[in-house]
Image (cartoon, coloured by chain):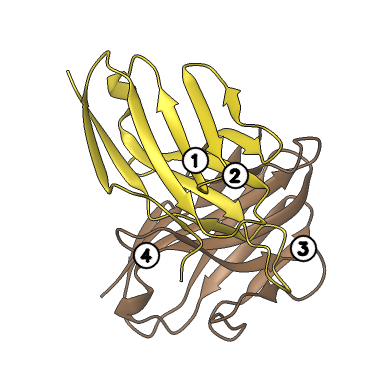
Chain colours: A brown, B yellow
Amino acid sequence: SAVISQKPSRDICQRGTSLTIQCQVDSQVTMMFWYRQQPGQSLTLIATANQGSEATYESGFVIDKFPISRPNLTFSTLTVSNMSPEDSSIYLCSVVVRGSDEKLFFGSGTQLSVL
Amino acid sequence: GESVGLHLPTLSVQEGDNSIINCAYSNSASDYFIWYKQESGKGPQFIIDIRSNMDKRQGQRVTVLLNKTVKHLSLQIAATQPGDSAVYFCAEPWVGYGGSQGNLIFGKGTKLSVKP
């Protein structure tokens, strides 16, 4: 497994502002992803964070709304831009750890509330 | 529609009893399934996985059963403890065109409550 640290763990933000979430992993990872979990719902993949290049977004998610960086193998950021109350969710960083037989591990998440 | 789903949204069991959480899937080509446990305020935690070439896999106090005929899998927790209280998700990789490697399709989740 791996220790996946996300910051902040929770935040309350005003409509129209942006929040950047950080994800740091203590192990060598092959892939990093960002998921969203809306209140009382299951998880949905937002994008794959690619090292040194633009992220790969899933249907329904766009770079302008959710810009992602991954400057190295173990660190990534997700920004939630121009927030509205509909963006209130838990945002989760997840990784595939090298040598873990392709298992997907999750961070503890960032609980975002937008007023 | 959703590929992976759960039969029951909530399950309440007595401490010490066995728990069974069910999951149905619709894609007969699915060949890998994972169970995750999510405690309140935490991210999903990997519990156990199973590939389609197996019918059963056992871990510590947990067993996953896969019935490919009816496209159903279940998670059995033996001697359920208060610490097992959580939401349990089944998941499978999305096998559609262009799907990302990390694109897991999660079921809706079953909330397990353990009564002392």
Please rate how many residues cluster around mark 2, counting C-alpha atoms within 10 Å: few if below 14, some from 14 to 19, many from 20: many
Mark with earlier residue (2, 1): 2
Q: What is the crowding at mark 4: few (fewer than 14 residues within 10 Å), some, or many (at least 20)?
A: some
Residue A74: give x, y in percent of width and height.
73, 50
On the same chain, marks 1 and 4? The answer is no
Mark 3 residue element: strand
The type of residue carrying mark 4 is Gln
The alpha-carbon separation of the residues under discs 2 and 3 comes to 31 Å
Q: Amino acid at mark 3?
A: Pro
Q: Residue at x 77, y 63 (%)?
A: A71
Please give the residue where the numbered disc 2 appears in the rendered image.
B33
Percent position of residue B18, x then y: 32, 20
Image quadrant in which you'd find residue A104: top right
Q: Is residue B43 visible?
A: no
For the residues labelled 3 and 4, the Cα–Cα distance comes to: 27 Å
Q: In the image, which is nearer the foreground, mark 1 or mark 3?
A: 1
Left or right? Give the position of B62 relative to A115.
right
Q: Position of residue A51 (x, y in %)?
A: 80, 63
**Depth order, front residue of B97/A41:** B97
Question: Which one is in front in this view, the residue at disc 3 or the one at disc 4?
Answer: 4
Q: Is residue B51 visible?
A: yes
The residue positioned farthest toward the front in the image shown: B69
- What residue sits 44% from the left and 54% below the top? B107
CA distance separating discs 1 and 4 = 25 Å
Residues at circles 4 and 2 in contact by the CB criterion of under 8 Å: no
The residue indicated by pointer 3 is A71
What whole-number distance in Å separates the C-alpha atoms at marks 4 and 2? 22 Å
Vertical relation: B55 (above or below) B9: above
Residue at mark 4: A38
> Which quarter of the image is occupied by the C terminus of chain A?
bottom left
Q: Residue furthest left?
A: B116
